Image: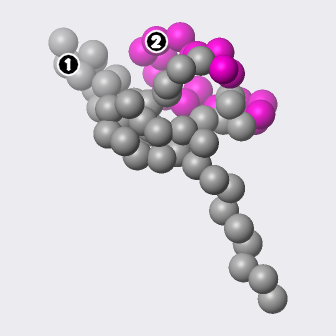
Amino acid sequence: MEKPVNPPQADVCPACGAGFTCGNKAGAAECWCSDFPPLMSVPEPLAAACYCPACLRKRIEAVKAS
């Protein structure tokens, strides 16, 4: 029996360098980032860089604290 292959991580976080998959760019109906409070607008599917879940969470917490 073959092991399932994980899809390649399509993005690299500009803050920490972690690999992750942006739902918008992967063709999902909705990205995981839509579960977070809005900090900035959701990028267009072909936009430059998105933050990974951990860095997006940190950025949102920093904005809330300021």
Task: Mark 1 and mark 2 in contact? Answer it, CB < 8 Å.
Answer: no
Q: Which amino acid type is shown beneath numbered disc 2?
A: Met
Question: Label 1 vs label 2: CA separation?
Answer: 16 Å
Task: Locate residue 2, reporting x and y percent.
Answer: 78, 83
Task: Locate residue 50, reporting x and y percent.
Answer: 49, 27
Residue at image coords 66%, 35%:
23
Quadrant containing the N terminus is bottom right
Task: Locate residue 37, reporting x and y percent.
Answer: 46, 21
Is residue 57 visible from the viewing direction of this image? no
Q: Left or right of 38: which side holds 47? A: right
Quadrant containing the C terminus is top left
Q: Left or right of 7: which side holds 38? A: left
* In this view, the mark in front (1 or 2): 2
Which residues make up the magenta segment? 27-46
Magenta stretch holds residue 43:
yes
Q: Left or right of 26: which side holds 56? A: left
Nearest the camera: 66 or 4?
4
Q: Quadrant of residue 6?
A: bottom right
Q: Is residue 23 above or below residue 40?
A: below
Q: Which amino acid type is shown beneath numbered disc 1?
A: Ala
Number of other residues with Cα within 10 Å of mark 1, as a class: few under 14, some 14 to 19, many 20 or more: few
Residue at image coords 72%, 79%:
3
Residue at image coords 66%, 20%:
46
Nearest the camera: 36 or 42?
42
Number of other residues with Cα within 10 Å of mark 2, as a class: few under 14, some 14 to 19, many 20 or more: few
Task: Report the residue marked by disc 2.
Answer: 40
SS for callout 2: loop
Task: Locate residue 52, reporting x and y percent.
Answer: 44, 37
Task: Report the residue marked by disc 1.
Answer: 65
Q: Is residue 55 above or below residue 3?
A: above
Which mark is first along the chain, 2 or 1?
Answer: 2
Residue farthest right in this picture: 1
